[in-house]
C-alpha cells in the first residue's frame, strides 16, 4: 500500500509570506497527485490535479510541482483566506485512493 | 453547476447500520461516478468507496466487508450503507463526484454521524 506523508503537520506563516508544503509518497505515483484545501466546517476543495494543473478558478498564487515520490504545494503570498488545512491525494493505480495526513497552515 | 447534498440520521447505535443518501442536482447521476469519503473528528480524510456510472463498485479494503454503495437513477441519488458500526465510525461523511482521473472535484457539505448508544 502506498503511504502519503505530508510535512510539516503545522506551518506557521505570516500573511504575504510564501508557504511551501510537502507531500511524499512511499513509492512512485508519477504525476497522479491532487491537492485539496479544507477550511473549518467546510468540505475539501480541489485545488490542483496532475501534480501541477490548477482547477479553474483557483488563484495563480497556488502552484504544484513534483513527480514520482516528492511533491510540493506552494502558496506564493499568503492571503487571510488561505489559512486552512491542505491534503494531498494520490490516484495512481487506483483503487484504493489515499490521502495524506494534512498540513495545517496557520497564522 | 453540480451540487451534492447528504442526508441521513445524525445518530446511530453501536452494531446498527449507518445509512446515508446523497442527492445530486445540476447533472445526471448516470453520466458520472460517485464516491464517499469520511473524516473522523480532528482527523484526516479516508476514502470509503465509489460507484462507477456502470454500477460497479470499489471499496476501501479496511471497510469492504461492511460497506455497500448503490445508485438510484430514478431519484438522481446514491447511497452508503455501513453495517455493524462502532464508535470508530463516528465521522463527517462526504459524498463527492469521482472524476475520471481519480479525484473529487464536487463535494457535499458533509453529514456528521455519531455512533453512540
Image (cartoon, helix red, strand yellow):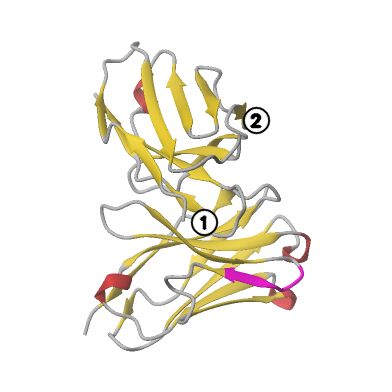
| Frontmost residue, B56 versus B16 | B56
Question: In which image quadrant can residue B56 be found?
Answer: bottom right
Residue B105 vs residue B42: left or right? right
Locate residue B16, reporting x and y percent.
35, 88
Locate residue B104, reporting x and y percent.
58, 49
Residue B11 lies, with reference to residue A98, above or below; the image says: below
Residue visible at 56% across and 41% down?
A29
> How crowded is the residue under tag 1: few (<14 C-alpha within 10 Å), some, or many (20+)?
many
Q: Main secondary structure of the magenta part?
A: loop
Residue visible at 35% across and 73% down?
B10
Q: Chain of mark 1?
A: B
Residue at the spot of label 2: A56
Residue at the spot of label 1: B108
Magenta residues (range):
B54-58
Which element type, helix, strand or loop, lies under badge 1?
loop
Residue visible at 28% across and 79% down?
B86
Residue A20 lies, with reference to residue B117, above or below; the image says: above
Question: In which image quadrant can residue B57 be found?
Answer: bottom right
Locate residue A68, reporting x and y percent.
54, 33
Q: Does the residue at mark 2 contact the one at mark 1 (Cβ under 8 Å)?
A: no
Q: Is residue B70 magenta?
A: no
Locate residue A72, reporting x and y percent.
45, 26
| Frontmost residue, B6 versus A105 | A105
Residue B34 vs residue B13: left or right? right
Amino acid at each position: 500500500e502506498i503511504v502519503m506523508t505530508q510535512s510539516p503537520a503545522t506551518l506557521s506563516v505570516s500573511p504575504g509570506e510564501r508557504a511551501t508544503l510537502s507531500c511524499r509518497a512511499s513509492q512512485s505515483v508519477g504525476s497522479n497527485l491532487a491537492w485539496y484545501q479544507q477550511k473549518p466546517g467546510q468540505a475539501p476543495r480541489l485545488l490542483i490535479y496532475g501534480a501541477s494543473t490548477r482547477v479553474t478558478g483557483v488563484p495563480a498564487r497556488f502552484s504544484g510541482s513534483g513527480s514520482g515520490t516528492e511533491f510540493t504545494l506552494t502558496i506564493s503570498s499568503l492571503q487571510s483566506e488561505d489559512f486552512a488545512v491542505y491534503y494531498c491525494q494520490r490516484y495512481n493505480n487506483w483503487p484504493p485512493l489515499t490521502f495524506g495526513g494534512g498540513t495545517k497552515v496557520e497564522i | 453547476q453540480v451540487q451534492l447534498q447528504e442526508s441521513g440520521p445524525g445518530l446511530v447505535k453501536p452494531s446498527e447500520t449507518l445509512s446515508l443518501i446523497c442527492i445530486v442536482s445540476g447533472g445526471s447521476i448516470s453520466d458520472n461516478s460517485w464516491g464517499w469519503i469520511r473524516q473522523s473528528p480532528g482527523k484526516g480524510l479516508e476514502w470509503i468507496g465509489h460507484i462507477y456510472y456502470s454500477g460497479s463498485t470499489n471499496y476501501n479494503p479496511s471497510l469492504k466487508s461492511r460497506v455497500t454503495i448503490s445508485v438510484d437513477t430514478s431519484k438522481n441519488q446514491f447511497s452508503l450503507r455501513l453495517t455493524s458500526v462502532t464508535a470508530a465510525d463516528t465521522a463527517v461523511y462526504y459524498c463527492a463526484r469521482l472524476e475520471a482521473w481519480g479525484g473529487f472535484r464536487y463535494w457535499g457539505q458533509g453529514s456528521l454521524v455519531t455512533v453512540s448508544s
